Image (cartoon, rainbow, N blue to C red):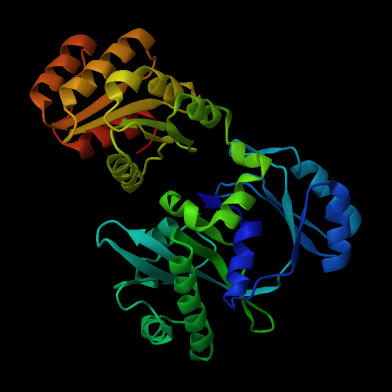
Amino acid sequence: MLVEEYLAKPLLAEAGIAIPKGRVASTPTEAADAAATIGDTVALKAQVPAGKRGKSGGILFASSPVEAREEAAVLLGSNISGYPVGKILVEERVDICRELYAAIINDPASKSPVVLFSTEGGMDVEEISAAHPEKVFRQRVDIRHGFDDADARALLAGTDLEVSLQEEVARILAALYARYRALDAELVEINPLVIDRTGTVKALDCKLAIDDAARKRHPDLVARVEADPGRAGTALEREAQKLGLLYIELDGEVGMLANGAGLTMATMDVINHYGGRPANFLEIGGEAYTKAKPALELVLSNRRVKSLLVNLCGAFARTDVMAEGTTRALVDLKPDIPVFFSIHGTGEEEAIAMVRERLGVQPYEVMDDAVKAAIQAAGGR
């Protein structure tokens, strides 16, 4: 469950992490009133459960209440990454001296939380890793012992952060981990964590994702998140809900169908690793036999999709049974984009033969090769 910035930031403030002054507005008049209260120069930030809002036109600036009203009228009712904008966060514009990056993530490789920190904030962590790999510092956390100020100081000792700031940033990292644990989070990210002209360290943004399995432990927060009309999702996501499918529309070009959440997430990671961009997350489990057609209709309805990657792994479910439903759906749907298969596990020989005979497509022996081919067909690397 993604939690929008206007709800996430107060949770950081409760943990003693400084945030800019801000007010939520649902109308241009409310935005003008907020600007008059906060200060003439403000940022207006669309509140939608999506990242990269700045690149999508979801963050505007105003230097007066009148201008705030005008910019709010542009944002409210617009569409950012497929989500309608019903609320904006009107926030004081911070005079930034330096931008940092801080996050707590779930790491599937180590099966542990990992603390991430970089002195190169303001970019996606993937961009930071590519541009300055030596400046992304990671600390795996043993959940039996946690992560405290001393652990944070040890992590920061290897960075080029000024010694005078390390104590405060260490305190913030420890508080961020405490929030991560208390909220049953999958991700808590501050990007950027800024140092303003007064030397104050502030969270200028916050991305928060909570484990869906923990929703019952946070009823008040869940109720506030779901009360927002914008949470209904994109048109395709709403259609998926009617079909009983967990589908999340993304902004990439490589459509995906894989059995199981773990395999789907791993496939997304591999697509990103090779420079591609996934177009969706779709949880179908072993129900590819019965739900392949409506699932593929969702994936293919996304006009951004330029290639389709089908990744089947047989463990509890047989790949030949899943391939039966998938190939039957593709024969019916007749997609006009190239389709690539990776099939491994129980029943793979039968499944591979079925795909080859029915679709004239030869599945790849190695998943990475199927991913690379799908990315290239979609116009990627």
Q: How many labels does the image show?
A: 0
* Residue 225 drawn at (x, y percent): 61, 50
Q: Which residue lies furthest to the left in this view?
A: 349
Q: Give the residue at x 48% y 28%.
A: 240
Figure quadrant of residue 378:
top left
Q: Which residue lies furthest to the bottom in this view?
A: 164
Report whether residue 4 is seen. yes
Q: Residue furthest right?
A: 66
State whether residue 248 is above or below residue 98: above
Q: Which of 219 and 286 is in front in this view?
A: 219
Does residue 292 appear left or right of residue 301 in this picture?
A: left
Q: Give the residue at x 39% y 87%.
A: 150
State whether residue 349 is above or below residue 221: above
Figure quadrant of residue 275:
top left
Q: Which of 33 and 346 is in front in this view?
A: 346
Q: Give the residue at x 19% y 17%.
A: 355
Q: Give the residue at x 53% y 65%.
A: 190
Give the position of the C terminus as an image quadrant: top left
Does residue 309 appear left or right of residue 96 in this picture?
A: left
Figure quadrant of residue 199:
bottom right
Report whether residue 204 is seen. no
State whether residue 81 is above or below residue 7: above
* Residue 345 drawn at (x, y percent): 12, 33
* Residue 177 drawn at (x, y percent): 44, 72
State whether residue 114 is above or below residue 344: below
* Residue 170 drawn at (x, y percent): 47, 82
